[in-house]
Image (cartoon, coloured by chain):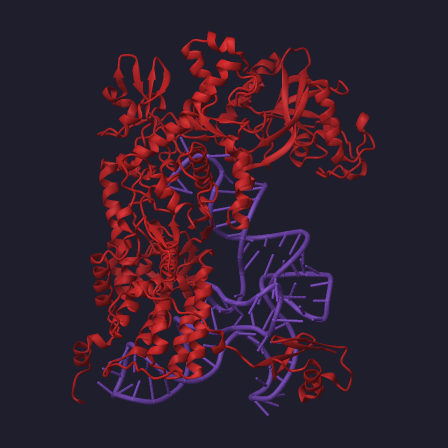
Chain colours: A red, B purple
Amino acid sequence: MYCLHPLYYRSSTTDMEYNFRAIEKKWQQQWQESHAYKVSNDSPKPKCYVLDMFPYPSGAGLHVGHPLGYIATDIYARYKRLKGFNVLHTMGYDAFGLPTEQYALETGQHPIVTTEQNIKAFREQLDNIGFCYDWDRQVNTSDPSYYKWTQWIFLQLFESWYNRSSQQAEPVSTLTAIFEKEGNTRHICPGDRQLQFSAEEWKGFDEAVQRNIIMQYRLGYLDYAEVNWCPALGTVLANDEVVNGVSERGGYPVIKKKMRQWFLRITEYANRLLEGLEKVSFSDAMKEMQRNWIGKSQGAEIKFALKNAAAHIEVYTTRPDTIFGVDFMVIAPEHELIQQITTPEQQSEIEKYLDYVQSRSERERMADVKQITGCFTGAYAINPFNGREIPVWTAEYVLAGYGTGAIMAVPCGDQRDFGFARHFNIPITNIIGDAFNGNEANPTKDAILQNSDFLNGMVMRPAMDVVINKLEEMRIGKRQINYKMRDAGFSRQRYWGEPFPIIYKDGIPYAMDEKDLPLELPYVENYKPGEEGEGPLANITDWVNVAPGIKRETNTMPGYAGSSWYFLRYMDPHNNNTFADRKATDYWNQVDVYVGGTEHAVGHLLYSRMWTKVLFDLGHIGFDEPFKSLINQGMIGGSSRLVYRIRGTHQFVSAGLKDQYETDELHVDVNIVDGVELDTEAFRKWKPDFSEATFILEDGKYICGVQLEKMSKRLFNTVNPNDLVEKFGADTFRMYEMFLGPVEQSKPWDTKGIEGVHRFLKKLWRLFSDEQKGLIVTNDTPTPAEQKVLHKTIHKIDGDTTTFSFNTAVSQFMICVNELYTLKCHKRAVLEPLLILLTPYAPHLSEELWHQLGNTSSILDAPYPVYDEQFTKESAFNYPIAINGKTRAEMGFALDADNSAIEQEVLSSEIVQKWLEGKAPKKVIIVKGRMINVVV
RNA sequence: GCCCAGAUGGCGGAAUUGGUAGACGCGCUAGACUCAAAAUCUUGUUUUCGAAAGGGAGUGCAGGUUCGAUUCCUGUUCUGGGCACCA
């Protein structure tokens, strides 16, 4: 024995050791062969739908930040399965998008090819981690069998309108029936509020006019909007591709250009999207963000006549009570009135200003409040109540899209108006007396009005209604609810997206026949934009020109099209007759738990909520909120490592000594750094530039600098899950990601700590198995102490898993194993339930030990242990004794002990006596089972 | 600029409804085993004064409420996310 080399043991006793590589491979294979994760749409069990936001399959692959949410849902899905639920847990790919197209432009690789490669790489990485997805249900938004139904849903939007009376979407046929009967008098046109016609007039319109009118009611409609146009690149750019007003690639100027584009009339759903938030359990922060995005406000629309002109300006204000404080008006630079009202004297000034605004992005316009810009139009509006002449300005801080694109400015009550008035020396009228100090605006609603004619002496809040009533009486204004939310742009001048199933006959858009779907994306050789900013599809003339006078739409749909409904497709992914069978959508119903990043807080969630409501209104599904509850996972930040090169040399100096030299900071691959210590050999091999590198060390080590920033390939701080799974196993990796901290919280990645979790799993293994003796589990009856450890753990794990508190669950597993280790417990009656608890977290290891214990069925469907309070009940408690809130001692008392007895014993104790210094205590507070506080 | 969130040891983080701040893990420290290393086990680890006993300070910062505040309130600083064509 003695003379045997240790390696001999290792090789001969592989079964006795925690050999995670063999175990994980073995069980992943077995589960695949036994179809362990196949989910049926037909089950007597209660259903549970657990969903991840599906990834965009980028070329960079998954880094350790991505699986955080996936692991969380995987644990939850496995837990619900153990609890007896039929769990739908799926994964797919949001595969259309700009980066893939950009990559195609740069390398000539077709997006279909790169997408396929990327998906394959993602799948390999995901499989490595041991998820329980039903892969037969995988979706890919760029697959024609999927986008056939995205196109179909778009046609539903195109062929419907929102009936404000019934508060729901209806087919356009009901709208034309109404027009034929009574015109549009009872159904204001959302696209043109001035539009009014009778039944007779409607019947008199030709088809082009009729279809043009219907277009202004459709939920999917055409309109004109501005895009970022870069003449030098000849293409339309995403906001992301524009930096400081110039293109990110090349730095060319970007201007705004009006183009005909598709929109979704999401504003019709504003109120339902707002009210629907009451029915779902999202975090308060998430609901608040969506509420703010929708931005419901109540106020008034007021018409101001213009001096010496027939036109009038319509403004929207939430503060009609301040109408006597209006010192100027501002209309948006895009406002259609601007050319009409500008006086000849101001013409050249205004033109200069509009040119300047052309170069500014909306973001810049909103963010730059320090830099006040604007231009006087020369026109004057007339205050309807006192006839006062009010100068009309234009300024970039007023946006065309919100309200009416014009505001009445009240400098004493609005800080931005105040700044503007100060900057341009516009005299300020004070209507709130002492409440306005002349140095800054006061937005109060509770001041008493002065200088306000018939409102004098009134409190502002009730004055709002008085003004609105008067405006309505005078027929120059009305009460108005407004939403900040705008209709959603649904066109992209790009190739890699869903083509629109729309054809134009003599310029009039028509829906394609459903039976001709999908309209497949044609194969192209190059991805250059079409003329005048059209998408690349415009270049394929024989695809575009269907027949003489008949053309296809050349825009494609945006990234959020496919992702707005994918959760429905998972329910019935292979259906070729409908997007998902009604039986399937009725069975699975809402997503019970949806997990994804906050970066999707508004966009994606509002769009999919709207699509769900439309499909519900049209009778295609039976629920109108897609996600019953939502959990936002935090981002995992990269922790970069830096090395310091002495300027002009190949010499690198350790972080602690860098201040003694003039150095340049360089990012170094975190994978060749152990903690903060650089592997200098690996560094020399990392890049040819560094092969000659020499190092100035401290304590014999090269210490790197640390910087927290985004995880990105460019910063060399990405960590590939594959490497960690290879080194520590999937079970360790899963548990470590969870151990890092709360799922919702953002935190930096640090690979170093993973060893602790790995040690824990090895230690757990040793409770079952000894390196020499093999399995050491006994059938003895557990002691009360062992039962207490087990049941405390059952209680904690069960509760923490339900509430997604996986980090504290992992820590409880560690505590449990530590305690069982101390108790030298190797009993089946304790270890078997523990394995079941662990299954959602470390499925491979649990299944292996489960079978080593002699079980023949899979642990994936084992009965979840039940907590029994009798094992954890305490009869006494060790009370902390505080003096004035500061803990000074500890004393044990029975939990049913009498308060006065406790008080007496506490007061007579030596330590309390010392702090009392002979005085009587002012008060003694006893909280049962918690603490005792003596107030001196 | 606006909206939302966060800030606790050297590091990730823990702390029922306001009730022992620092669980668990990393790192570090000292030790056992070993020729040595790895693995494993044991010890200590907020900081400061003190040999110890014991005391002071302490949850971004400044106030407040309370017998008692990481937790509630007011103000403030910094960091992260979003702001409508990145996904």
Name the residue nearer the viewer: B72 or A845: A845
Residue at 49% of width from left, 77% of height from top? A870
The single residue placed furthest to the right in the displayed view is A457
Q: Is residue A695 something one can see in this rendering?
A: no
On screen, residue A541 above or below A283? above
On screen, residue A877 above or below A579? below
Is residue A334 left or right of B85 when viewed as pictured?
right
Could you say where residue A513 lies in the image, as x and y percent from the top left?
A: 31, 23
Name the residue nearer the viewer: A66 or A567: A567
Q: Quarter-wise, where is residue A152 in the image?
A: top left
On screen, residue A389 above or below A435? above
Image quarter in which the C terminus of chain A is found: bottom right
Residue at 23% of width from left, 77% of height from top? A16
Is residue A29 left or right of A872 when viewed as pictured?
left
Could you say where residue A827 lies in the image, as x and y percent from the top left?
A: 34, 80
Q: Is residue A807 something one can see in this rendering?
A: yes
Residue at 22% of width from left, 63% of height from top? A25
